[in-house]
Image (tube, rainbow, N blue to C red):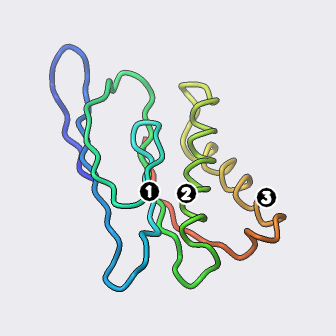
């Protein structure tokens, strides 16, 4: 992802993101959270958002050797999206991510999701 700041009266962030499947892969195992929206697959997104409001951008990379890597990355970002949508504007990122981690671990109770894994990069 690439970010650019617009110095004006209203603070703006312009973002650009793209993702594509690797050579020999049937599908892309990555997912991105862009200004509150979870995207997956061949992502080609850009936009400008008001930076005076809390914003979260994240990338989740499904671990290919785990079970359901595509589901893992999407579900993690859906959990993050839900937490960011319901948290207070001044909630620090680290406690929020700890809650998301607990939510993600709880998914393992579902035998179909047990063993899935993903990595996360996130910014506020």
Closer to viewer: mark 3 or mark 2: 2
Q: Secondary structure at mark 1?
A: strand
- Classify 34 as above or below 59: above
Q: Earlier in the sequence, mark 2 or mark 1?
A: 1
Q: Earlier in the sequence, mark 3 or mark 2?
A: 2
Q: Is residue 9 left or right of residue 103?
A: left
Measured as percent of width and height from the top left, residue 75 is found at 61, 56
Residue shown at 25% from the left, 27% from the top: 12
**In this view, which residue lies farthest toward the left?**
7
Q: Which residue is mark 3?
A: 106
The reply to whether discs 2 and 1 touch (Cβ–Cβ < 8 Å) is: yes
Q: Which residue is mark 1?
A: 40
Residue shown at 52% from the left, 70% from the top: 62
Q: Secondary structure at mark 3?
A: helix
Residue 77 numbered tag: none
Q: Earlier in the sequence, mark 3 or mark 1?
A: 1
Q: Nearer the viewer, residue 121 or 74?
A: 74
Dot 2 alpha-carbon crowd within 10 angstroms: few under 14, some 14 to 19, many 20 or more: many
Measured as percent of width and height from the top left, residue 4 is found at 19, 40
Closer to viewer: mark 3 or mark 1: 1
Residue 74 numbered tag: 2
Q: Nearer the viewer, residue 2 or 71?
A: 71
- Classify 78 as above or below 5: below
């Amino acid at each position: 992802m690439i970010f650019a700041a617009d110095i004006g009266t209203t603070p703006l962030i312009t973002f650009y993101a793209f993702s594509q499947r690797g050579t020999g892969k049937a599908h892309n195992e990555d997912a991105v959270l862009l200004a509150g929206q979870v995207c997956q697959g061949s992502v080609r997104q850009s936009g400008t958002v008001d930076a005076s409001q809390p914003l979260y951008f994240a990338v989740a990379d499904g671990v290919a050797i785990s079970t359901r890597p595509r589901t893992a990355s999407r579900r993690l970002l859906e959990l993050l999206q839900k937490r960011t949508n319901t948290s207070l504007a001044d909630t620090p990122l680290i406690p929020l991510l700890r809650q998301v981690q607990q939510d993600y671990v709880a998914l393992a109770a579902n035998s179909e999701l047990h063993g899935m894994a993903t990595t996360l990069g996130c910014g506020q």
